[in-house]
Amino acid sequence: MLIAQQADGPLIRFTMEPLFEDTGFALAIMGVLVVFMALALVIAFITVLPHLAKRTAAQPVQTDVKPTAHDELAEETLVVIAAAVAETIRQRHRIVKIRGLTPEDLGWSFTGRLQHHQSHQVRGRTRR
Amino acid sequence: MSSFDYISQKAVQLFETTALPGMEPGNLIMVVIGIAFIYLAISKHYEPLLLVPIGFGIIVGNIPSVSGMSLTVYDEGTVLRYLYFGVEQGVYPPLIFLGIGAMTDFSTMLSNPKLVLLGAAAQVGVFLTYLGALCLAFTPQEAGAIGIIGGADGPTAIFLSSRLAPELLGAIAIAAYSYMALVPVIQPPIMKLLTSREERLIRMKPSREVSRQERIMFPVAAFLICTTLAPGAIVLIGMLFFGNLLKECTVTDRLAMTARTAMIDVVTILLGFCVGTSTNAQYFLQAKSILIFVLGATAFAVATACGLLFAKFMNLFLNEKINPLVGAAGVSAVPDSARVVQMVGQEEDPNNFLLMHAMAPNVAGVIGSAIAAGILWSQLGK
């Protein structure tokens, strides 16, 4: 079927024949099935992964070492944070917990979320 | 010879040694396109890390060289040709996958495994577009390279087209990266069209915490699973999971840091610039390129729709419903499509945070598109 004409031949030629060859429907269906099968196996593995991880996880070593002052936040830091919170909220409030970030907290997902909220507006019609 | 004739003769000689005599209208069109890419990157923030190198590369690739001088990416022995080697032989994309792996956090996917299926569903768009390209009389190899644009993964598209249809590499790369940059424009209308307001308001439970052991075991096991079924994906998937292992094992921080910063930046510059330089109007402005752009847009839209519709299908069987918007993140434009899910979701409910949920199908889409590329390569690359 000729849809448009170019100087040296048709611009668009439409044919159904290739669909019924080995590289047509057969390949497409096989491709979709393999992708689904591979990711289904990944899902199965992910589902049992927590149990596997628990088994392989090393037992925590019992120590009677108490946290040193080095692990705790300095009193001055706590005062500064409390002052900043009071200045921001300007209402009666209670700070329940203040703790330093662990390496896990500093993961990509956390910083990614922060960057996302600080990044450009993707669309102009976004309500803010 | 009068002094006037002498000056005229020299002026003509000078003119002939400039790029102006060889400048065709097509080159001017491409230069304008290159400038438009740079404008979109700088003013609209559309994938600036990609569009600036590509845009400038387009301008460089469309300045005609003087006859007798070998300068372009198509001439043997030129500097640009050597740089282009990494694109032509598929060297750069796996290196980019290494960097992507080193910056990807699979935790959200590990904490909600059912969302992985959405990454698989979006790959249906790849194979539907492949069939569409076959109907338009592309060869199976060309159709495979075009279809993978629906995977919304630039490096994968470049890798596969360099293996299957190197003559279409420029058009496919530009189409793939253009549509990746246009994710915030292409996806929202499809997402709104295929979902009701009630569906967009669905809130999902927060993800569980994933242990370090899980995050270390996952890349090794997932690599074995994926490449056993699709060995063609060894290069891309292997580098992706290798990079992720470097990150998660925490004993190779220096390597992971290099992979996700300096190395991926260097390769992105080279890849983007070289792809841009390969778009000389003489080779690029052809009827096939237009078809590739149309099919690429179709692939992207179909992949988005497949992810969304599959999420709705899954909701028929799930007690804890998933917000179908996250299905749109099954295309592997990381993290842009997840961002778009977040933005569209927040338009309905500003307190609904879908970003981390959308990251699950998003990274699953990366794996899915690499597997799809591996299948197409192994079946069509003979």
Image: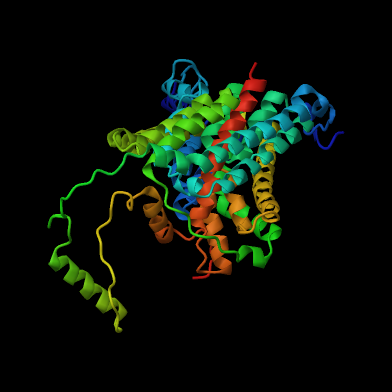
Q: Residue furthest right?
A: A1
Judging depth in this view, the residue of B52 and B70 nearest the camera is: B52
| Residue at 66% across, 34% down | B147
User: Looking at the picture, does residue A91 appear above or below residue B328?
Assistant: below
Left/right placement of residue B39 relative to residue B290 reads left
Q: Which residue is pictured at 66% across the width and 60% down the height? A: B192
Q: Quadrant of the N terminus of chain B?
A: top left
The number of numbered badges drawn on the structure is 0
Horizontal side of residue A18 vs B258, given as left or right:
right
| Relative to B34, residue B281 above or below | above
Residue B336 sits above or below residue B61 on the image: below
Give x and y (percent) for residue A4.
81, 37
Does the rendering let one see residue A12? yes
Residue ID at (68%, 31%):
A31
- Image-quadrant location for residue B364: top right
Residue B57 position, x and y percent, is 47, 35
Display colour scheme: rainbow
Percent position of residue A50, x then y: 46, 43
Choose top left, top right, bottom left or bottom right for residue B303. top right
Question: Where does the C terminus of chain B fall, quadrant-wise?
Answer: top right
Q: Is residue B157 visible from the viewing direction of this image? A: no
Residue B143 lies left or right of residue B229; in this view the side is right
Quadrant in which residue B10 is drawn: top left
Image coords of residue B336 (percent x, y): 51, 50
At horizontal 79% and vertical 34% (from top left) the residue drawn is A12
